[in-house]
C-alpha cells in the first residue's frame, strides 16, 4: 500500500492548495470522496465532533453516506437538513443552527461540515465563523457553482432584507472535498449556471483553458466526470491563486477580477428581484455585455468577443436579455444606484484579450447605457 493510499487518498484525486499561511487548506477533487471523507478529514481536523449541515434536496442522496463515513473514522457525526433555497441564508436560520450546535454540544474543537450548494456553504460558514468566536468548518460542495466558486476563498454570509450577503465574515474552511459523483443528481439548469463561472476563469486568466472549454463543453454538459474534474481543478487553481494573493479583496487587489460580468449581473438580479434568471445565467449575460463594452472601449478585438459569446451559447446559457425583461434605463439605473448610494465608484472588469482582464473605474455612464440598449435578443 502506498503512502497516499494509507492516508485515504486514491491516486486519482486531484489536489489544489490554497496558500494562506496558517489558514492554508486543500481542495480535493475526486469521484466518491464522500465515502472516504472520514479518513481524509481525520488528518485535517483536531476534534472528533462534527455536525453535517445540508438541505432537503441534497441530504436524502448524500447526507447519510457522509455522516456514516465520518462515524466510521471515529467522528461523532450527525446530519441535519434545512429547507432548500436562498431563503435559508438568513439570520433566523443561523440562530436555529446555533441552537442545534448547542444541542449537539459542539465546543471550540468541533467542526461544521457544509454539504450542499452555495446557500448551505455560505450559511454554515457564517455560523462556523461566529459560533464561539469561530470553529472549524469543511466544505463539501454539491453544485458546480459551489465547487468552483462559493466553497473556495472563505467568504461566508447570510442575507439581510436590505441586501444579499450583507451580514458576513471571512472564514476559511479547513478543507474542501469535491465529490464529482454528486453532480449526477444536479438539475441541468444548475449545471449550466455553474459553467458560467467556469467560463469566467478562462476569460480572466487562462486562454488555454478557454480553448479547452471550447472543445470540451459538450462533454461537460454530458457530465463526463473526467472532463468535469479537469474543469473544476483548473477553475479552483485559478481562484486559489487569486485568493492566496488577495484574501480579503483589498482595494485594487486581484480578487476583484472574479467579478467579471457581475456588475451587469447584479443589476439584472436586483431589477428582477432575483427571479427569472439564475445567478449563473445573469453572469453569462453580464460577461457577454462586458465583452461588448470591452470592444467599445477599444480593449478587446471583435473576434475575441465573438468567441466569448459563442462559448457561453454553447454552454446553453443566455448572451442577451429578452424582450419583456426590464428596460435598459432601469437596468442602467440599478447598475449605478447601489454604488452611488454608498459613495463608491462603479467598476467594470473588462477583458483586453481572452485570458486577461483588468478592473476599470473610468467607464462613462453613457457607454454603459449604450451596452444595456444593445444587449437584447
Ligand atoms: N461565498 C462565495 O464566495 C460565493 C460565491 C458565489 C456564490 N455564492 C452564493 O452561493 C449561493 C448560490 O449557490 P448555488 O448556485 O449552489 O445554489 P443553492 O445552494 O441554492 O443550490 C441550488 C439548488 O440545487 C440543489 N442541489 C445542490 N446540490 C445538488 C445535487 N448534487 N443534486 C441535486 N440537487 C442539488 C439545492 O438544494 C438547491 O435547490 C448564493 O447564495 C450566492 O450568494 C457565494
Ligand atoms: Zn458569481
Image (cartoon, rainbow, N blue to C red):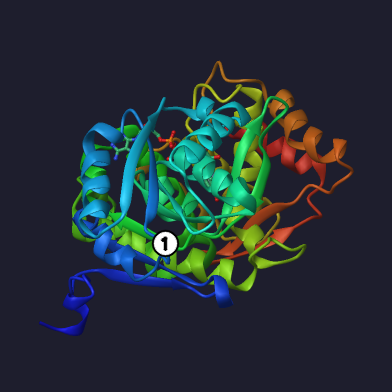
Rendered view: 105 above or below 189: below
Q: Of 39 and 221, which appears nearest the observer?
A: 39
Residue 133 in picture, x, y percent from top left: 65, 53
Q: Can residue 192 be seen here?
A: yes
Residue furthest left as drawn: 1
Which residue lies at the image location 49% right of the left edge and 40% below the top edge? 101
Q: Quadrant of ligand 1?
A: top left
Residue for badge 1: 47
Q: Of 13 and 343, which appears nearest the observer?
A: 13
Q: Residues within 10 Å of mark 1 (few under 14, many from 20)?
A: some
Ligand 1 contact, mark 1 (Cβ < 8 Å) = no
Q: Of 353 and 302, which appears nearest the observer?
A: 353
Which residue lies at the image location 56% right of the left edge and 43% below the top edge? 127
Rendered view: 234 above or below 138: below
Compared across the picture, whether 299 is left or right of 102 comes to: right
Which residue lies at the image location 79% right of the left edge and 55% below the top edge? 361
Please state, as top left, top right, bottom left or bottom right, where the N terminus lies in the image. bottom left
Residue 363 in picture, x, y percent from top left: 78, 50
- The quadrant in which residue 53 appears is top left
Residue 105 in picture, x, y percent from top left: 46, 44
Residue 179 in picture, x, y percent from top left: 27, 54
Compared across the picture, whether 289 is left or right of 200 comes to: right
Amino acid at each position: 500500500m502506498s503512502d497516499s493510499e494509507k492516508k485515504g487518498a486514491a491516486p486519482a484525486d486531484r489536489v489544489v492548495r490554497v496558500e494562506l499561511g496558517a489558514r492554508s487548506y486543500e481542495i480535493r477533487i475526486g469521484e466518491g470522496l464522500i465515502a472516504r471523507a472520514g479518513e481524509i478529514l481525520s488528518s485535517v481536523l483536531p476534534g472528533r465532533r462534527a455536525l453535517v449541515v445540508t438541505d432537503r434536496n441534497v441530504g436524502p442522496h448524500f447526507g447519510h453516506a457522509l455522516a456514516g463515513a465520518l462515524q466510521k473514522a471515529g467522528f461523532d457525526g450527525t446530519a441535519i437538513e434545512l429547507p432548500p433555497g436562498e431563503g435559508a441564508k438568513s439570520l433566523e436560520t443561523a440562530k436555529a443552527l446555533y441552537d442545534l450546535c448547542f444541542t449537539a454540544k459542539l465546543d471550540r474543537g468541533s467542526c461544521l461540515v457544509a454539504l450542499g450548494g452555495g446557500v448551505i456553504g455560505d450559511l454554515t460558514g457564517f455560523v462556523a465563523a461566529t459560533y464561539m468566536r469561530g470553529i472549524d468548518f469543511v466544505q463539501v460542495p454539491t453544485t458546480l457553482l459551489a465547487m468552483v466558486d462559493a466553497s473556495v476563498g472563505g467568504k461566508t454570509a447570510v442575507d439581510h432584507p436590505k441586501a444579499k450577503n450583507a451580514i458576513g465574515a471571512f472564514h476559511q474552511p479547513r478543507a474542501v472535498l469535491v465529490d464529482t459523483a454528486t453532480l449526477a443528481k444536479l438539475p441541468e439548469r444548475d449545471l449550466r449556471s455553474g459553467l458560467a463561472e467556469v467560463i469566467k476563469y478562462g476569460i480572466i486568466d487562462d486562454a488555454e483553458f478557454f480553448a479547452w472549454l471550447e472543445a470540451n463543453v459538450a462533454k461537460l454538459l454530458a457530465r463526463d466526470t473526467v472532463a468535469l474534474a479537469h474543469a473544476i481543478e483548473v477553475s479552483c487553481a485559478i481562484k486559489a491563486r487569486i485568493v492566496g494573493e488577495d484574501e480579503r479583496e483589498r482595494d485594487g487587489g486581484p480578487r476583484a477580477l472574479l467579478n467579471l460580468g457581475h456588475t451587469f449581473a447584479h443589476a439584472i438580479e436586483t431589477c428582477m428581484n432575483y427571479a427569472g434568471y439564475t445567478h449563473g445565467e445573469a453572469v453569462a449575460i453580464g460577461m457577454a455585455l462586458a465583452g461588448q463594452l470591452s470592444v467599445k472601449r477599444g480593449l478587446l478585438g471583435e473576434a475575441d468577443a465573438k468567441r466569448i459569446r459563442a462559448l457561453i451559447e454553447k454552454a446553453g446559457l443566455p448572451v442577451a436579455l429578452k424582450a419583456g425583461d426590464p428596460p435598459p434605463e432601469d437596468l442602467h439605473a440599478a447598475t449605478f444606484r447601489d454604488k452611488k448610494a454608498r459613495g463608491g465608484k462603479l467598476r467594470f472588469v473588462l477583458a483586453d484579450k481572452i485570458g486577461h482582464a483588468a478592473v476599470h473605474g473610468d467607464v462613462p455612464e453613457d457607454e454603459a447605457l449604450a451596452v444595456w440598449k444593445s444587449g437584447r435578443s
